[in-house]
Image (tube, helix red, strand yellow):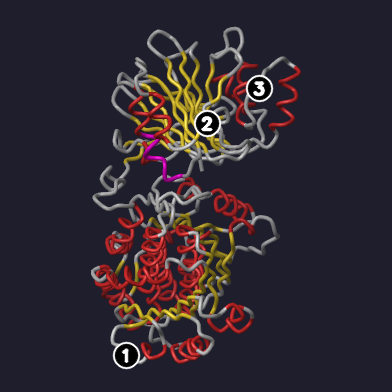
Amino acid sequence: MCGIIGYIGDKQAKPLIMDGLKRLEYRGYDSSGIALITEAGELILEKKMGKIEMLENHLKGMEINSTFGVGHTRWATHGKPTDINAHPHMDCKHEIVVAHNGIIENFKVLKDILIKKGHKFISDTDTEVLVHLIEEFYKDKIEIEVAVRYALQEIEGTFGIVVISKREPDKIICARNSSPIVIGVGEGENFIASDTPAILGHTKRMVYLDDDEIAIIKKDSFRIINMKNVPITKEVQEIEWSIEQAEKGGYPHFMLKEIFEQPDAIHNTMLGHLMEDIGDTRLGGFRIFSDDELRDLERIIIIACGTSWHAALIGKYLIEQFARIPVDVDYASEFRYRNPVINKRTLIFVISQSGETLDTLAAMREAQNRGGKAFGIVNVVGSTIARESDCGVYTHAGPEIGVASTKAFTSQLTALILIAIFLGRKRNLSLSQGKRYINELKLIPDKINKILENTDSIKQLAKKFFEHNNSLYLGRGYNFPIALEGALKLKEISYIHAEGYPAAEMKHGPIALIDKNMPVVFIAPKDSAYEKIVGNINEVMARDGIVMAVSNEGDEEIAKHCDEVLFIPETIEEFTPLLTVIPLQLLAYYIAVLRDCDVDKPRNLA
C-alpha cells in the first residue's frame, strides 16, 4: 500500500506534508515525493528514491512559500523504484499533478492512445497515464474536477487519487475506487490522506469516501459527487484515537508497543459486551437477525487474510464447539475466484484490522451479491468494510502501526470468543458454561500482563535462536493456528524461514528436515492434546532437533523433554491461544532486533 497526504489551508504545507509522509511509513514504500503550488503560482515537484530522509535532505534549504500541496510514498508495482517513477506525476504542460494508490489495469491501451495524441511519457508507471488523461480533458473552461471525472470514466482498475492544478490553486480533488481516501475536516483548513494516522495530529473529524466518489476540497469547505455528478451527503465522523496512541510512546518500535498494549486492547474489545449474570454477550450487530434466524443458521463462512485468517481458524473451533454450527474458513483472495455455495441460512464473517483489505472487501461484496449477510469484525471506525457490511462489531484496539499484526490478532480473537458465546447461548450453551467462559475471559488481560512482566527469558532465548535460518512451529487443536501465527511473525520481521504445522502432520514430511540445526517450537499447554504433543516432542528430540515449548506455569514434566520452555499462566483450553501467542510475538520481535531488521517496516511488506 502506498501513502497519500494532502493539505489546503493557511499554514505552510511543506512541513505538514512531510510529517504526514513520515506517519505513513508503516504502509511500506520505496520512494517518496511532494508537490507544492507556491503563493506565486509556481508548481514545485520533488521526488526521491529511498527513505523519506532522502527527500527531506533534498528539500533542505529550499524556501517554498506554499499553503497547498500533496505528498506520496510509493510501493512499486509498475516500474522499478527510481526518482522518475516516484509519485506524484505531472502532465506535459507542468500544470497538473496526480498521486495515486492502486493499479490501472488498462494503462497500456490508454498510453498508446495518448502517445498518438502527442503526449510525452517519462516514467514506467501506470499512474502517469492518468495525469495525461486528465490533461486531455482539461481544456477550454472545463474545471479540474470535471476533467478528473471524465478521465476516471476511462480507467479500469483500482485507485485512490489526489489531483491539484496550478490553474486552480484553491482546490484539491480526490477520488477512490477500492483504495481508501479520508478527508480530515479542520477549521479554515482541510486534509486528505490514505489513512487517518497521517492527519490525526491535526483533526479527529474525518469523512470517508466510498467507491466511485469524488471530493472537491477547498480550505474552508468540501463537497462530494459521484461519477455521474450527483451530489453526495457524507457524515463527518469523530475518531476516538489520539495522536499519542499513534506514536511510539517511549518504545523503540511500534511492534513492541503494540504487543504491550494487548491487555488494554482485549479489555476494550470486551467492554460493554459481557453480561455476567446470564452468561451471555451483548452484540448489537446481531439485531438484524431474529432469534429464530440465528437458531436456524446452517453454516458460517469466515473470510480473512494473513494473521486475520489465523484468528478465523480459531474462531471456527470456538463457534463449532460453543454453537454447533459448521464453519468454513476461506482465504479472501481465493473466495471470489471460485463458486461458493451461499444461501439465506449462511452467515459470512469478514475480518480485517483496517477494514480496507482489498481482497477481503471484494470477497465480502461477492458473498453479499450471492445473497449472504456479512458481519464485519474490524478495528477502524468508518472503514469501507465497516460501512458496507450488513452488521458487525468493532474491536476498539486503537491504531496498529507496526506492519506485523499483534494486538489486532488478539482483539479479533476476543471478538470471535464473544460471538461464539453469543451464538452458543442462542443454541445449546448452558448458563453455567456461559458464565464460566465470561469469568475466565475477564482474567485474560491480567494473565497477559503477567507474561509481559517477565520477558527476560524470551530475550535470552532469542540470543540462542537468532542465527538459525529455519524453524518449525507445531501445535494441536486450538493452538495449531498459533503455530501458523508464530511462524508468520518470525518470517515476516526477521526473514527466517519458518513453517507452522499441525503437530501430528510432522511425520508426513517435515520430520525429514529435523537435525541438530533445526529449532522446533511446540505450543504445548496442558490441554486435551497434551500427552499427544509430548509424544511429538520426543520424536523431535530423538532426531537431535532443538526443542522449545510454550507451556503452563508449574509444568515441571515438560522441561524434561525440551531444551527450553517459556511458561504462561493457566486458563481454560479454549482461551489458551490468547496467551500462547504472546511469547511467540516477543520471540519474533527480539530475534528480528538481534538480526538488525527494520521491525516496523519489514521489506516488501505493507
Callout 3, which amino acid?
Phe
- Asked whether 190 or 510 is in front, the reply is 510
Q: How many marks?
A: 3
Label 1 sits on residue:
556
Quarter-wise, where is residue 218 in the image?
A: top left
Q: Earlier in the sequence, mark 2 or mark 3?
A: 3
Q: CA distance from mark 2 to mark 3?
A: 19 Å
Q: Is residue 530 above or below residue 185?
A: below
Q: Is there CB contact under 8 Å for labels 2 and 1?
A: no
Residue 572 forms part of the magenta stretch: no
- Asked whether 284 or 59 is in front, the reply is 59
Q: CA distance from mark 3 to mark 1?
A: 69 Å
Q: Of circles 2 and 1, which is in front?
A: 1
Badge 2: how crowded within 10 Å, few (<14), some, or many (20+)?
Answer: many
Residue at 29%, 79% in the rendered image: 569
Q: Is there CB contact under 8 Å for labels 3 and 1?
A: no
Residue at 68%, 56% in the rendered image: 337
Q: Earlier in the sequence, mark 3 or mark 1?
A: 3
Residue 291, image x, y percentages:
45, 69
Residue at 58%, 29% in the rendered image: 227
- Please provide the residue range marked out in magenta: 20-27
Label 3 sits on residue:
121
Element type at marker 1?
A: loop
Residue 598, image x, y percentages:
42, 51
Element type at marker 2?
A: strand
Q: Earlier in the sequence, mark 2 or mark 1?
A: 2
Callout 1, which amino acid?
Glu
Callout 2, which amino acid?
Ile
Label 2 sits on residue:
161
Q: CA distance from mark 2 to mark 1?
A: 59 Å
Quarter-wise, where is residue 587 in the image?
A: bottom left
Magenta part mainly helix, strand or loop?
Answer: helix
